[in-house]
Amino acid sequence: MSHAEEPLAPDDADIAPGDEEVGGHEPIEGIGSYLIGLGLATLLTIVSFFIAGTTLVWGPSIPVALVVLAIAQMGVHLAFFLHITTGPDNLNNVMALAFGVLIVFLIIVGSLWIMAHMNHNMMPMDQIMQMQR
Amino acid sequence: MTGFEATAGSGRPDRIGYVRESRDGRHPAGHAGALASKRIIVGYGFWIFLLSDIIMFSAFFATYAVLIGQTAGGPSGRELFDLRNVAIETACLLLSSFTCGIASIGAQTHRGSWFYGAMAATFILGATFIGLEISEFAGLVARGAGPTRSAFLSAFFSLVGCHGMHVSAGLLWLLTMVAQVFAKGYRPDILRRMLCFSLFWHALDIIWVALFTVVYLMGSGA
């Protein structure tokens, strides 16, 4: 009857963001993911700084490459530092994150889109000055 | 009914939210949801705060992106930014994120040497970051490229300064956490605060990744 007294099956329980399921109690056991994250993030950062100053690649592709590298590095941080996973115990964390990313996307892309259109439709500044005379 | 009451009354202080039940009072509304520990609830609540903080930053990023060309005849990012300085700042913040992870492991496993050592390293790296940023700002203002020079520089100082203020607040919080662990030990409530602090610090590093890419690398390179 008192099924709730039993320890929860792993796929039933939630996990706090930032927490990681680690078996043992030795500090050394939890350090692995942070080391992987540090290595990957360092690599991506170095590539970003290299790409930004290089003439080896076609110029207009550089901003795109930088954005892709930054998103990849944010993913590395989320996975290895914040321990956000795709597992069922992280569903709530991932859903909140997805909603946050949606709003961020709407704000940034929406602002750029609207302001680009307004700039496009605006009369050149010297003509406005002319009309105000 | 009886089984549920037995659960609710069994006095598990780390379990809250167990009073949630369906209308017939027979079953808990959701098995997993009904038994979330306080650590999960606190962590999740702070996660929601961090996401809203990131949304606030996105507004600053959008402002900056819109105003990036409005230099009013003043200097543009290409003339102002020193990528060597930015690379050192980035290395500081990335390493501090790593040492903050070590500190949270140390707190959870109750290892003082890990916790205090890693927190000290995090503080030094974070303070170095802030110091470099302040000297960069002071240099810009001294060159006549302060926040009042152009819309571009206003947006630059608000965006980067807002992140810098978050890091400064994080440093104060770091000192508070060290003091709390020192005075009160590794109590569950202190460990929950430590969880929130490490989430905060990692989130600041994520924002810095977007920041150094959009502001510094795209501003000076492309």
Image (cartoon, coloured by chain):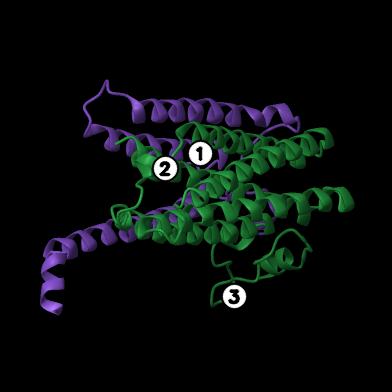
- On residue B25, which mark appears? 3
Question: Which three-letter amino acid code belongs to the residue tagged 3?
Answer: Gly
Identify the residue under disc 1: A77
- Chain that bears disc 1: A
Outermost residue on the top side: it is A56
Q: Nearer the viewer, residue A20 or B155?
A: B155
Q: Could you tell whether B31 is left or right of B109 in the image?
A: left
Q: Are marks 2 and 3 in contact (CB under 8 Å)?
A: no
Q: Quadrant of residue A113?
A: bottom left
Q: Could you tell whether B26 is left or right of B2 in the image?
A: left
Identify the residue under disc 2: B80
Q: Chain A hue? A: purple
* Nearer to us: label 1 or label 2: 2
- Chain that bears disc 2: B
Q: Nearer the viewer, residue A44 or B92?
A: B92
Q: Residues within 10 Å of mark 2 (few under 14, many from 20)?
A: some
Q: Chain B hue? A: green
Residue at 62% across, 60% down: B41
Residue at 75% across, 29% down: A26
